[in-house]
Amino acid sequence: IAGITQAPTSQILAAGRRMTLRCTQDMRHNAMYWYRQDLGLGLRLIHYSNTAGTTGKGEVPDGYSVSRANTDDFPLTLASAVPSQTSVYFCASSVDRGGTGELFFGEGSRLTVL
Amino acid sequence: AQSVTQLDSQVPVFEEAPVELRCNYSSSVSVYLFWYVQYPNQGLQLLLKYLSGSTLVKGINGFEAEFNKSQTSFHLRKPSVHISDTAEYFCAVSGPEYSSASKIIFGSGTRLSIRP
């Protein structure tokens, strides 16, 4: 069972470049999320989607955009990368939007912006 | 607004010793509480969760946590740790009034290192 697949696993990017982090799940979960993990700050929510066709802003959405064209895919795009976006990015999903449910995480995408 | 504080950024312990990872939350209403574990170079996975009922919650790998409403705490414990428990542990809080996993707030994490 694959669960959540993220790509790339690691990327070095020049500032100003556009980058899309891919996330695919095979669990047919309705809700999906993008977090960034920074040392000492834990995980912070960037964007989320409660169901295909809808998205919402999390705690730190600036500089990022998402789309949810279907249930399985939830790409995160950095339109013009900046060094402060250097981080480890995690995609997650849950069965539905309810706050009682378990979040399932991918293995992360490590992004370095120079 | 809800928040969660993990009091220790790092906890070193010897193998087979007991461990407690501390977590305090602030919320004016009912809460759901979670502990997630992140092994090196992996994503997070759920250890255990408290939604309601018994305040002592048992999770995977021999971990347990106790919900203490009066002290607003949800400390994670294990009576005897193993080298394989080396990981980062995250406490998280949500609540029924939010009704959305997008409102789960994560703590800053505690790195547990086990010494042989």
Image: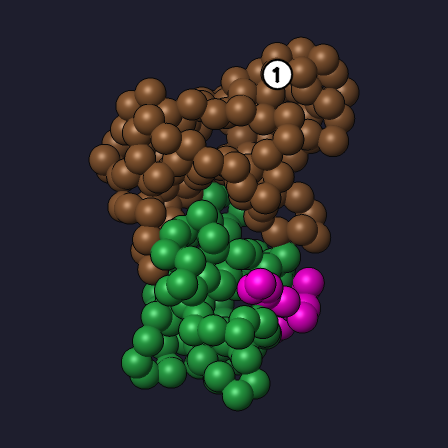
Instruction: Pinpoint residue B69: horizontal percent, then vertical percent.
Output: 48, 84
Locate the C terminus of chain A and report the quarter of the image it occupies: top right
Instruction: Pinpoint residue B6: horizontal percent, then vertical percent.
Output: 63, 67
Answer left or right for B113 relative to B49.
right
Does residue B65 sit above or below A97 in this rendering?
below
Residue at point 53%, 24% (across, down): A65
Q: Chain of mark 1?
A: A
In the picture of the structure, the residue carrying the numbered disc 1 is: A79
> Viewer-proximal residue, A8 or B50?
B50
- Residue B101 colored in magenta in the image: no
Instruction: Pinpoint residue B57: horizontal percent, then vertical percent.
Output: 36, 76
- Label 1 residue SS: loop
> Viewer-proximal residue, A28 or A53?
A53
Query: Taking the image as drawn, is residue A91 in sight?
Result: no
The boundaries of the magenta stretch are B1-14
Chain shown in green: B
Does residue B91 sit above or below B71 in this rendering?
above
The quarter of the displayed image where residue A58 is located: top right
Answer left or right for A29 relative to A93.
left
Query: Taking the image as drawn, is residue B101 in sight?
Result: yes
Number of dots carrying numbers: 1
Residue extending furthest top? A17
Residue at point 73%, 23% (across, down): A82
Residue at point 60%, 21% (across, down): A78
Mark 1 is on which residue type?
Answer: Ala
Instruction: Pinpoint residue B105: horizontal percent, then vertical percent.
Output: 53, 56
